[in-house]
Amino acid sequence: MTRVPAARPAGSSPAGRRVVTPLVAAVVGMALGGCAHGPADAAFGAQPSPSPEIVLLPMPSATAAAPPSGTTATYRQVAGVTLPDPGTTPGATFPDVTTTQLCDVAYSHGVRNPSYDDKARAFALYGVSLRERDQYLADRLIPVSLGGSNAMTNLWPQPYSGGALDKDLLESHLRRLVCTGRVPLAEAQRAIAKDWGAAAKKYLPMVPTDASPSPNARTGPVDPFEVRRGGLCPAAGATGLTVDKAIAFTCQLTSDGTLRWSKRY
């Protein structure tokens, strides 16, 4: 009788040794390759580490934002003084304020200062860059001392070179004329809003009926380097205190090449 050999288990050799199939060998090889350290033996499924790359972005432009189209105001030059555009800055007041309230020495402390954003908008309306702000006074056309408000129609960048300090003197004098009954409040408001240069010629020669000296009155020779905002000063770095408010100012070189008393910023 012919003997039939017994069936061998799959994967075993005739000598009883286990045979590794090609598929098993490939899987084992890939698994072992993950433990290798050479770059050619990267683990199965791993992604190469990307090389760091530095990209230099362009620097943003430092130019000031352009004012809104069609809203740029125009200065007026009349008799050597600079006046605002009457269409953009006609002046604005608190309609309910009375002369009695204005003449209280503490009145101005109850009126806030214009915000930075409002000042920036006023500068933009006149096409003035904020980089040149040291040449301008963020001014209320009708001052607080005469009932002026912080409305945008009352704010404008007044150039120091156009008589800004002379307007300050007029404002103080007009308040005293109003508070002593020489000039009605509404008249003073209209005069300074329409043409403060003409108002100075009309009202500065007037003497208040009150015989007591004005807090802002100047006696003796005028100091050309008196410490006041925007006033000329002697040397860069010098410091000084204002006479009335004891505010410290520093003598700084402005962007137009002049030395003026300024706040630190």
Image: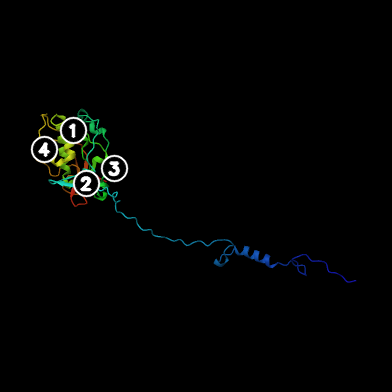
The earlier-in-sequence mark between 3 and 4 is: 3
Closer to us: 180 or 234: 180
Name of the residue lying farthest toward the right? 1
The residue that disc 3 covers is 118
- How far apart, in angstroms, are the residues tagged by discs 2 and 1? 27 Å
Quick check: can you spot residue 193?
yes
Q: Secondary structure at mark 4?
A: helix
**Would residue 232 be seen by someone viewing this image from the given angle?**
no
| Residue at numbered disc 2 | 136
Contact? badges 3 and 4 (CB < 8 Å) = no
> In the image, what residue occupies the spot 15% across and 35% down?
174
Q: Amino acid at mark 2?
A: Tyr
* Separation of residues labelled 2 and 3 (CA atoms): 15 Å
Q: Which residue is mark 1?
A: 186
Task: Using a 10 Å C-alpha cutoff, classify the residue at mark 3 as few (fewer than 14 neighbours), some (14 to 19) or many (20 or more).
Answer: some
Disc nearest the viewer among 2 and 4: 4
Sequence-wise first label, 4 or 1: 1
Distance Cα–Cα, label 4 vs label 1: 16 Å
Q: Position of residue 254 (x, y in %)?
A: 21, 50
- The answer for how far apart the CA atoms under marks 2 and 4 are is 25 Å
Amino acid, disc 4: Lys
Q: Please, is residue 100 above or below residue 21 in the view?
A: above
What residue would you read off at disc 4?
202
